[in-house]
């Protein structure tokens, strides 16, 4: 499967934000109620995240960012 391209190269990736928050892929996956493989796929650009509003709120809380600070593209 081809890697999805980022449209904002200077923006932090999900992986960057996750690591800054001190979270493993598995820990973030548990918070969002998804699999670790799903988080890995997002970070590698192999799939696009489709999150509910409660999941987006949990993601922002876990990463310590606002919705506007989340990258439009989660891959690195």
Image: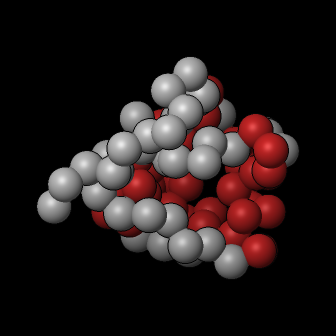
Q: Residue at x 76, y 38 (%)?
A: 69
Front residue of this view, candidates 45 and 37: 45
Residue 74 in the image, given as x and y percentages of width and height: 50, 47
Whether residue 42 appears in this view of the structure is yes
Q: Residue at x 69, y 44 (%)?
A: 70
Whether residue 36 appears in this view of the structure is no
Q: Is residue 21 above or below residue 62?
A: above
Q: Residue at x 72, y 64 (%)?
A: 56
Q: Is residue 37 above or below residue 15?
A: below
Where on the picture, by quarter, is residue 66?
top right
Farthest-out residue, left = 1
Where on the picture, by quarter, is residue 63?
top right
Residue 21 in the image, given as x and y percentages of width and height: 65, 34
Quadrant of the image for the N terminus?
Answer: bottom left
Residue 32 in the image, given as x and y percentages of width and height: 60, 67
Farthest-out residue, front = 7
């Amino acid at each position: 499967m081809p890697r999805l391209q980022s449209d904002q190269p200077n923006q932090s990736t999900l992986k960057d934000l996750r690591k800054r928050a001190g979270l493993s892929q598995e820990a973030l996956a548990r918070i969002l109620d998804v699999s670790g493989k799903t988080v890995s796929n997002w970070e590698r650009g192999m799939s696009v995240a489709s999150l509910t509003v409660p999941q987006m709120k949990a993601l922002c809380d876990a990463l310590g960012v606002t919705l506007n600070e989340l990258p439009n593209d989660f891959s690195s």
